Amino acid sequence: MQTSSSDDPSYSQSSPPRGRRARWKGVYRGRWGVADSCSFSGVQSNPEEQTSGEAKKENRVIVLYLDLSFLLLLELKKMSMTRGCLLCIKITMFVFNLIFWLGGCGILGVGVWLAVTQGKFATLSISFPSLSAASLFMVTGSVIMVVGFIGCLGAVTEHRCLLLTFFVVLLIIFLLEIISMVLFFTYNDNFHKYAQEDLKKGLSLYQTAGNLGLTNAWDIVQTEFRCCGVKNFTDWLEMRNSSLVPHSCCMEQSPTCQSNPSTWWKDPCYEKVKRWVGSNISSVEIFGICILIVQVFGLIFSMLMYCQVLKAEKYYE
């Protein structure tokens, strides 16, 4: 009897049909991530896919490296630009404050020269006896020198505290000047009345003990401007209770000129000085505007340098 192929033991141990073999072979070869071996103890990935994954990782690392390099170069560029701006502002501010300081030295020198050559040359005002030309020059020059020195030191050292101090001091001076100008133009008439009354009171101290400066000041003003008295020559007669006027009121010097009204200057000193200031008001205005512009530039440079120093410190941190 012929046996069937299904009863043959060798047939039962043979490989599966072709379709099933192809399917399981695909499974074992890594279609589902399994190795070519029949043993499932060591699962390995497909070499082609492993190579592709490693290449992708390498690409990501290269891209990340390039990104970091670009960011680093960008930050270095920003830092170099910041340092360049800081250096430019630093040099400009140092030169500005050096000129400012030298100007203060010059004004202080003029004040010292006036104090030495003119002796006790005082103001004509009795309310402000220390407000002389020499003292004004010396105080103004000293303040300018101190402010300029602080600015130069702050520019050289790049110290934020010094820069801020320079800015605050210069801002206070600037605001005081603006307030003084506004008050002067607002109360212009009251200022002139007060000044005339104050000057008139000072006539009583002429040629008295301890008032050599005031005496010299009146003699110089009346001689240079060819005037007599504050409003007119009668101010001397009224305030001194005398019929004599100072010799500086005389047109020509003579033994009797101080008692002879025909030889006195008739113009009032206050009006003459006021007209002289008015004729030179353009120069005064230009001088005042230049001072204000210089102060504004000082404020701008100091604040710009302060901000640049602060930005540079943040970069280095």
Image (cartoon, helix red, strand yellow):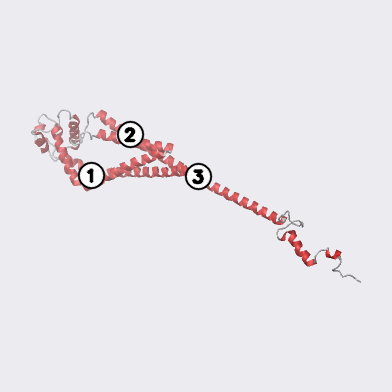
Q: Nearer the viewer, mark 1 or mark 2?
A: 2
Q: In this figure, which residue is indicated by the disc labeled 2? A: 106
> Taking the image as drawn, is residue 229 in sight?
no
Task: Please provide percent x and percent y for residue 205.
Answer: 14, 32
Residue appearing at x 68%, y 55% in the figure:
52
Task: Please provide percent x and percent y for residue 276.
Answer: 22, 42
Q: Which sits earlier in the primary sequence, circle 3 or circle 2?
A: 3
Task: Please provide percent x and percent y for residue 129.
Answer: 20, 34
Which residue type carries mark 1?
Gly
**Hey, which quadrant is residue 115 in on the image?**
top left
Q: In this figure, which residue is indicated by the disc labeled 1? A: 278
Q: In the depicted view, which residue is nearer to us: 26 or 71?
A: 26
Residue appearing at x 64%, y 52% in the figure:
57
Please give left or right for residue 210 compared with residue 169 in the image.
Answer: left
Q: In the depicted view, which residue is nearer to us: 15 or 278?
A: 15
**Hey, which quadrant is residue 210 in on the image?**
top left
Which residue type carries mark 2?
Gly
- Badges 3 and 2: C-beta atoms under 8 Å apart? no
Q: Residues within 10 Å of mark 2 (few under 14, many from 20)?
A: some
Residue 79 has which mark?
Answer: 3
Q: Nearer the viewer, mark 1 or mark 3?
A: 3
Which residue type carries mark 3?
Met
Task: Please provide percent x and percent y for residue 180.
Answer: 26, 44
Q: Does dot 1 land on a helix, a strand or a loop?
A: helix
Q: Residue furthest bottom?
A: 1
Q: Residues within 10 Å of mark 3 (few under 14, many from 20)?
A: some
Q: In the depicted view, which residue is nearer to us: 16 or 105?
A: 16
Q: CA distance from mark 3 to mark 2?
A: 40 Å
> Taking the image as drawn, is residue 239 in sight?
yes
Q: CA distance from mark 1 to mark 2?
A: 26 Å
Q: Does dot 2 land on a helix, a strand or a loop?
A: helix
